[in-house]
Amino acid sequence: MSRMTSFLLVVGSLVSCATHAEQIDKHDECTRMRDHMVDLRTTGFDSVRTSDGKPIDLSAHREALLNAMGPSFVDNCVARMSDDELNCSKNATDITALRRCASH
């Protein structure tokens, strides 16, 4: 194998690794953003009571939201969401601000 071929293989491998690392980073960012969205959607529910006066099970609501979003939510985020929209969503402090991010 010539030196040029070896060099090109190494460069190609490095580029491939960098791209894969970026996809993993964005997947992690999208997962954090999804969790933040669930946090925003459940904010204030801790004061809600059932008909018999007991506090609602907030963890069940969080789990239901995560299940409803499914793994495809993160996959779609990785594939389609711009970095600006992702950053805006992660930094949103309420649902109204989160909705504004979708228009970026």
Image (tube, rainbow, N blue to C red):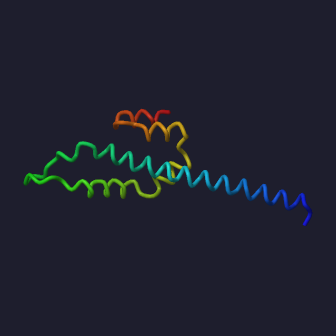
Residue 24 lies left or right of residue 71; in this view the side is right
Residue 65 drawn at (x, y percent): 33, 53
User: Residue lying furthest right in this view?
Assistant: 2
Label total for image = 0
Quick one: quadrant of the N terminus?
A: bottom right
Q: Residue at (53%, 43%) from the top-left corner?
A: 81
In the picture shown, does residue 1 fall above or below 36?
below
> Residue 64's quadrant in the figure?
bottom left
> Residue 5's quadrant in the figure?
bottom right
Q: Residue at (39%, 50%) from the top-left corner?
A: 35
In the picture shown, does residue 98 fall above or below 74?
above
User: Residue lying furthest left in this view?
Assistant: 52
Residue 52 drawn at (x, y percent): 7, 54
Residue 16 drawn at (x, y percent): 70, 56
Residue 29 drawn at (x, y percent): 50, 48
In the picture shown, does residue 37 fall above or below 63?
above
Residue 20 lies left or right of residue 37; in this view the side is right
Q: Residue at (11%, 54%) from the top-left corner?
A: 54
Residue in the foreground of this view, choosing between 86 and 10 = 10
Residue in the foreground of this view, choosing between 6 and 82 = 6
Residue 88 lies left or right of residue 13; in this view the side is left
Residue 59 lies left or right of residue 25; in this view the side is left
Q: Residue at (27%, 54%) from the top-left corner?
A: 61
